[in-house]
Image (spheres, grey):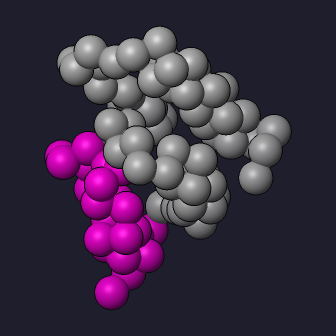
Amino acid sequence: MDLGKSMENEFRTLLASDLRLDGTDLELADLRRKLLAVAQAIGRYHWIRFQLRSTGYEITIDNSEPRSTIDEIKRDAIIAEIEMIMSGEQQ
């Protein structure tokens, strides 16, 4: 199994359902490292999805269900941590 398919299986809960990873993508190893860090950062909060856009990979967060103030504070902290991971400031 190539790296792309392996990552699709490993990170199924984090990836958009229509996202297909190409095993020849040279950035997959970096993306995998970031996905592992994000998975660790968000814990049980799997309402985050990675998608591929024309400008590269994008993270979307599902805001459809109401959350308490504590949830919003946690969400903001998670978003900040994800932004640092994706920019390479944190690993």
- Percent across and percent down for residue 70 are 50, 20
Q: Is residue 79 visible?
A: no
Q: Residue furthest right?
A: 89
Range shown magenta: 1-24
Look at the image and say whether residue 7 sits in the magenta stretch.
yes
Determine whether 11 is above or below 70 in the image. Answer: below
Please determine whether, in this image, residue 29 is positioned above or below residue 27.
Answer: below
Q: Nearer the viewer, residue 16 or 26?
A: 16
Q: Quadrant of residue 68?
A: top left
Q: Residue at x 29, y 26 (%)?
A: 62
Q: Give the residue furthest to the left.
A: 18
Q: Is residue 42 visible?
A: yes
Dominant secondary structure, magenta: loop
Left or right side of 38 for 24? left
Q: Position of residue 89 (x, y in %)?
A: 81, 39
Q: Position of residue 63 (x, y in %)?
A: 30, 18
Image quadrant in which you'd find residue 52: top left
Question: Is residue 4 inside the magenta stretch?
Answer: yes
Residue at image x 44%, y 32%? 59
In the depicted structure, whether residue 60 falls above or below residue 52: above
Q: Is residue 56 left or right of residue 82?
A: left
Q: Residue at x 37, y 27 (%)?
A: 61
Side of 91 relative to 72 (left or right): right
Q: How many marks?
A: 0
- Residue furthest to the bottom in view is 1
